[in-house]
Image: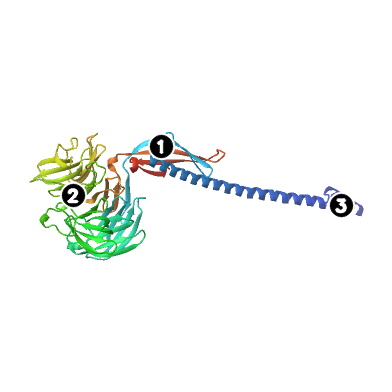
Amino acid sequence: MNDDTSSVVMKGSRGRPALSSVAILMISSAVVLVSVYVLFNYVTGIFRRQEGLEEQLQALLTEESAADLLAADLTRGSISDYSRIPSYEVNGQRTSFQLIGVNSTPPEELEWDISSCGIIQVVPIEDDGGLILLSLKEDTLNMIRASLNGSGNTELLFSIADPSLDTGSASALDYDGQLLVLLPGIDGGIGELIVFGSDSLLWSAPVETGPMVGVPFMTAGLVDGERSVVINSGLREGLIVSLETGRASRVFSPMGTVPLIHGANRLLGDTLQTVHETGGSAVRDVVRGDYNRDGMADIVFAGADIIVLLDGASGRLTRDSLPGFELAAWGTAESKGLLSCRWVCEGRQERWRVFLDGGFMDSPGPEFLPFEWQGRIFYSRNSMIGTISDTVFIASENSGSLTPLFDSGTSVFCNVDGHGPDIINYGMDRLGLILDPLEGNGLQLLLRSSTMDGDRDLLLVSRWGFRVFGSGSGRRVRTERAV
C-alpha cells in the first residue's frame, strides 16, 4: 500500500513540475516591462495631449491676432477686393480668410442698459468718443461716463449731493486730457465746475453761472497764455474761468453770438461790455462746420430771429435776418454743404436762404426734401436728417422715404466720433447712440478662417463676422466670432 501511495505522489509531481527561479525572474521582468510600457504610453499620451492643447491654444491666439490685423487693414482701406484677403502669420502659424458672404447692415448703433441708473440727462463729449450720464438717485447726483469702446461699458466718475445744482442743464467738454463738467446753479445761483484727470478728480470750484437760457455751451483753449474755459448759456454775457488758477471773470460777445474760444485759441468776446451793442435775442444753438468751403471750421449762431456765421479763417461775422420771420431750421440741405436756413412767417409763409460768396441770399430750398424741418438739419449722401413735428426723421432723396427715428424730446444731435452727425436717444431704461446715420448702411462680411502650422497641417477652422462702416478716415470695423 505504501508503494501505491508513493507512486501516485510521484505521478502528481511529474504532472506539475516546479517553476525554476529563472522562470520566475523572467515572468517578473515581463510584468515590469509591461508596466513600464503602459506607464510610458500613458505619460507620452499626456505629453501629446498637452502639446495638442498648447497647439490648439496657440492656433486660437493666432486666429484672434489675424482677425485684429485684418480689421486694421480694413480700417485703413488697404484691402479693396474682399474676395482676395491676405493671410497672416503669427508665431509660426498662418491664418487665411475666405469670403463666404456679403450683406448690408444698418448704421452702427450702440446700446447701454440704464434701467438701474435713473438717467435724467445725457451730455455728449464731442470729438472725444464718450457720453456723460447724469443719474439722480436718492438726492445724489452721479456722473457716469459711457465709453464707445463697447456697449454697456460705463464708469462712475463722481457723486455729489447738492440740491442747489440744476441737474437738468449740464455740459461737458474734453480738453487737453481733462474732462470738464459744468453743473449750473438753479435760477442763476452758484454752480459747480468739476475737472477730472485721466483717473481721478482733480479739482472743483463754485462758479456764478447766472440765468440759464438752455444747456450751457463750453469751449476751451489758451487765453492770454492760460488754459481757460469759456462758459455761456445762449446769452452775450458769459464766463471765462482759468484752469490754472480757478479765477473767473465776465466776458461779452457781439450781438447775435455767445462768447467762445475758436480756431487757434482765439477768443470771441471781450471782458469789457460794448455799450452800443446791447440787447439781441438769445442764441438757441451753436453749430460748427466748413460752410464757406475754405478748409477751416466756421461757427454758426442760431437765434430766434437772427443767424450769424463766424468765418473760421478771418474771424469775420456775417448776420442775416428777415423782418417778421422766425428762424425755423439751420444746417446743410444739399450736396454742396452750404449753410441753409429755413425761415417762416406766422407758420404759413416759408423762405429758404443760403450762405454763398460771403453773404446770405434766397434759395429754392431742398428740392426733393421740402418738409417742415425744425432746428438742426444735416445733409449727406442724398439724405437729410432733422426734426419734423417733434420727431427726428431721416429722409432719402433716392427713395423719397421719410423714416421716423426718435422723439426729439429725448434725442440729442452730436458728433462724438469726429465724423457725425450722430444721434443720442435715451429713455427710462435704454440709452442708444446711432453713429453716422447719413453715411448709409455698412457692409457685413462673413468669413471662414483656416489656421495651419508650419507643416501646413490644419489646426483650426472658424467663422468670423466683420462689419465695416463709413469711409476714409471715418471708417470703423467691428469684429466678432460667428457662431
x and y percentages locating residue 464 in the rendered image: 43, 41
x and y percentages locating residue 61 in the rendered image: 49, 46
Instruction: Tell me if mark 2 has few (under 14), some (14-19) or many (20+) residues whose alpha carbon lies within 10 angstroms of its own.
Output: many
Q: Which one is earlier in the sequence, the residue at label 3 or at label 2? A: 3
Left or right position of 211 against 432: left
Residue for point 24% across, 49% down: 411
**Of the numbered discs in the image, which one, if any, rests on residue 9?**
3
Instruction: Tell me if mark 1 has few (under 14), some (14-19) or many (20+) residues whose alpha carbon lies within 10 angstroms of its own.
Output: some
What amino acid is at disc 1?
Ile
Tell me which corner region of the image, top left, top right, bottom left or bottom right, holds residue 469. Answer: top left
**Of the numbered discs in the image, which one, if any, rests on residue 79?**
1
In the rendered image, which residue does mark 2 sit on?
301
Out of 31 and 278, give the one closest to the viewer: 278
Residue 253, above or below 246: above
What amino acid is at disc 2?
Phe
Colour treatment of the image: rainbow
Q: Which one is earlier in the sequence, the residue at label 1 or at label 2? A: 1
